[in-house]
Amino acid sequence: MPTAVIDGIETNYREMGSGPALLMFSPGGFDARIEKWSDLGVYKRIKLLDHLPEKYRCIVFDRRENGQSGGRVERITWQHFVRQASGLLDHLDIDKAHLIGGCMGCCPVAAFGVAHPERTLSMVHYWPVGGANYRISGHQRFARHLAFVDENGLQAVVDLVRSHDKNFSGDPRGGPWGQPIRNSDTFAQNYADMDKAKYLLTVTAMYRGLLDRDTAPGAEPEDLMRLDIPSLIVPGSDGFHATSAARYLQECLAGSQYWDILVDQQTEENAPKRVLDFLQSVDG
């Protein structure tokens, strides 16, 4: 698959289909890989990638720190993911694009819309993450990683993540840089050599910034309320994709379309069609 170096970090991406550009922010929380559009939960069931490329130039990519994309230890914010996405559009010489995010991918979609409304044709939020349980469980996951580092050091993280293939959700002790550690010996060595105290401060600031509210994170409500971007919101309904988070986005995004449908009624027969109908209504 092709790669692009964006902000000094390699991004693994793939293009499928032809037509107007549709930039797809992968689901999967802190394991946001291209494959998650096809093998994760609801996305495996509705098979968006079997249908959207029939009408759109779908651009899928591994979010930084995930899959075959690279990473960098720093206080990551939603704007870092926006920078990756906008850089990928620049690399492909695309001025404007539709955006779709699944799960945690909805957060950088919202942040991108706020940062670059002039480049955003529309936004689709499919099962946006959020809710009190999402924030609490996310904080607990980072706390387990920080406690492991504090007790065992950063070399122990390298040894741990290279002993299995679990992601940050599967084994929180390994932290959010597990995949780059597996992918690159140089990254792993630099990671192990970092100052532990500074690392702990960096990661603490990072998760407090990313998981800062009991609703959908990614952008401030006042900024979302100023947008005039056609939007479609498809709700989830579990401990990580609270329906309240989807309703929050509906409240903040003026004129947005909310597909009021139960989770078990979202199928391959109706979900891709609903998304395509929305996108084509924007394109006219």
Image (cartoon, rainbow, N blue to C red):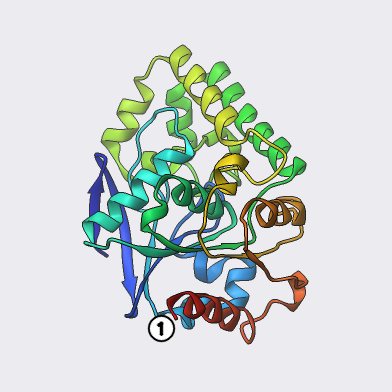
Of residues 98 and 268, the one drawn nearer to the viewer in this rendering: 98
Q: Is residue 116 toward the left or the right of residue 135 in the image?
A: left
Eyeballing the image, is 214 above or below 195?
Answer: below
Q: Position of residue 225 (x, y in %)?
A: 60, 48
Of residues 234 and 200, the one drawn nearer to the viewer in this rendering: 234
Which residue is pictured at 76% across the width and 74% down the height?
A: 264
Residue at disc 1, secondary structure: loop
The amino acid type, in three-letter code, at marker 1 is Lys
Which picture quadrant has residue 125?
bottom right
Q: Is residue 258 toward the left or the right of residue 13 in the image?
A: right
Of residues 250 and 84, the one drawn nearer to the viewer in this rendering: 250
Which picture quadrant has residue 94?
bottom left
Which residue is pictured at 51% across the width and 67% down the height?
A: 37
The residue tagged 1 is 55
Which residue is pictured at 32% across the width and 44% down the height?
A: 70
**Position of the C terminus by quadrant:** bottom left
Q: Position of residue 65 (x, y in %)?
A: 41, 44
Eyeballing the image, is 16 above or below 198?
Answer: below
Q: Residues within 10 Å of mark 1 (few under 14, many from 20)?
A: some
Eyeballing the image, is 193 above or below 11?
Answer: above
Q: Is residue 210 among what the camera can see?
A: yes
Q: Position of residue 67 (x, y in %)?
A: 40, 53
Which residue is pictured at 76% across the width and 60% down the height?
A: 237
